[in-house]
Image (tube, grey):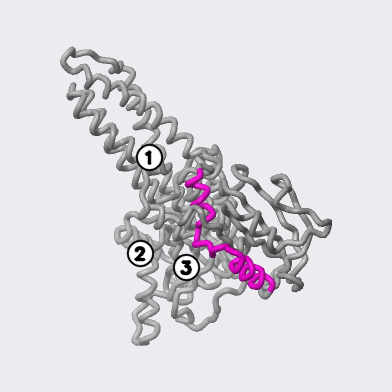
Amino acid sequence: MIPNETIVALATPSGAGAIAVIRISGKNSILIASLVFQSVSGKDITKQKTHTLHLGYVADGPKIYDQVLLSIFKNPNSYTGEDVVEISCHGSVFIQQQIIQLLLRKGCKMAQPGEFTLRAFLNGKLDLSQAEAVADLISSDNEASHQIAMQQMRGGFSNEIAKLREELLNFASLIELELDFAEEDVEFADRTQFHDLLNRIEFVLKRLIDSFAVGNVIKNGIPIAIVGEPNVGKSTLLNALLNEERAIVSEIAGTTRDTIEDELVIEGIGFRFIDTAGIRETNDVVESIGIKKTFEKIEQAQVVVFLVDSSQLSLFGSQLSVDQLKMEIEQIRNKYPHKTILTIINKKDLISSDMLHMLETQLTTENKQLQTLFISAKNKEGIDELKQTLLSFVNTGALRNNETIITNTRHYDSLLKALEEIQKVKWGLESNLSSDLMAIDIREALYHFGEITGEVTNDELLGNIFANFCIGK
């Protein structure tokens, strides 16, 4: 980025629409805009106040491109902290391109991905974690991810980190001061208060680190693999959950030969369902590939929905058949010990009420550790209960209480490193370690705090972060 350059880009999504917004930022924004804008009332926009709207035409000499609304935001009261002009034109792709090309000819440079937000960060309008939240806000596709991104963009996470860093910095200054009077053996930092502070920082860091498990799920959605033997109703279940005919349903076993994925938002939380090929022994090459993909998707999933055809159990009608099912469930649990396994008995409409009662008794009442639901995917019975069960797997307490939740892997990594250094300082304090050695660990902790908010940064880090932004933001 060259700070003196004036940049331009389309701020709205590319393609035709009712309107499009073209954004200009830099010290010559208003001057360049004045070269192409003709006010309907004859105003000179270089002399207008900030935060004003002006109706007029974008023209190049006698050639008029469009009637537009021009917005003026003067520094420092703009998104980037620079002079910003936004041109709202009609959404024709041709008009967008013509206006941007005209502005480029008049002295603008094409903005790089994320350059407007990068300038906002460099000009002190946002810290780094808030800037990253802008990208999360743009990509949020459900209520929960939107709520987290908004809280972070408004500075909730930054403020919490900044407060801890400031308190630690104050003690660090006192520790460093002690080094100047080492020969006199004096203590400026109250060790008891310092110990209490380290305990408090450790507690907050652990809470933030623990929140990443929930935050990552909310941000990326919960992957759920629907598995089972052929023809137990996996595709029917997917269609019932999505309330649309997403997967082909047939009485022929092995219809689904590849994985089918789709997303569903339940009470603001995103779930990514994966309908897999039925697991069985087969000589069909294509079906074998599908079954191999099934096991790959199980590895990627956080929740495994094991679907069973209740009518197949009713053919046996004996205690043994249920025990075999329990053994199968236990085998899956042993194979995937870190995954949530939910057993669903499908097609309950095809068995007698006595058989249904027997299955419910033996699979739920006698084995409370088994998470089992009875549904009819075809008739959409039990689907709402299934959705609520899936929702219960997500700890939404922190979200409901508006607590700070970490969703960013970079933040998570910095917090882990900061916690490690804080624990070193705490050990040093309890072991009566010399101030100069403790000061080293304190400086490292402060460094990792600064990495989060951008008080410590470098060009490579900024490049990696803002490369993921879209052009125009």
Q: Quadrant of the N terminus?
A: bottom left
Q: Is residue 308 left or right of residue 323?
A: right
Q: Residues within 10 Å of mark 1 (few under 14, many from 20)?
A: some
Q: Which mark is residue 274?
A: 3
State the image quarter where residue 430 is shown: top left
Which segment did they paint magenta? 95-123
Q: Amino acid at mark 1?
A: Gly
Q: Secondary structure at mark 1?
A: helix
State the image quarter where residue 56 is shown: bottom right
Position of residue 25 measured from the top left corner of the image (x, y, whole percent): 58, 55
Q: Which residue is mark 2?
A: 299
The answer to whether residue 116 of the structure is visible from this angle is yes
Q: Amino acid at mark 2?
A: Glu
Residue at the spot x=53%, y=62% of the render? 111
Is 121 inside the magenta-drawn segment? yes
Q: Residues within 10 Å of mark 3 (few under 14, many from 20)?
A: many
Comparing 224 with 184, the one in front is 184
**Magenta span main SS:** helix
The answer to whether residue 319 of the structure is visible from this angle is no
**Does label 1 or label 3 sit earlier along the sequence?**
3
Q: Is residue 157 above or below residue 275?
A: above
Q: Which mark is residue 108?
A: none
Q: Secondary structure at mark 3?
A: strand
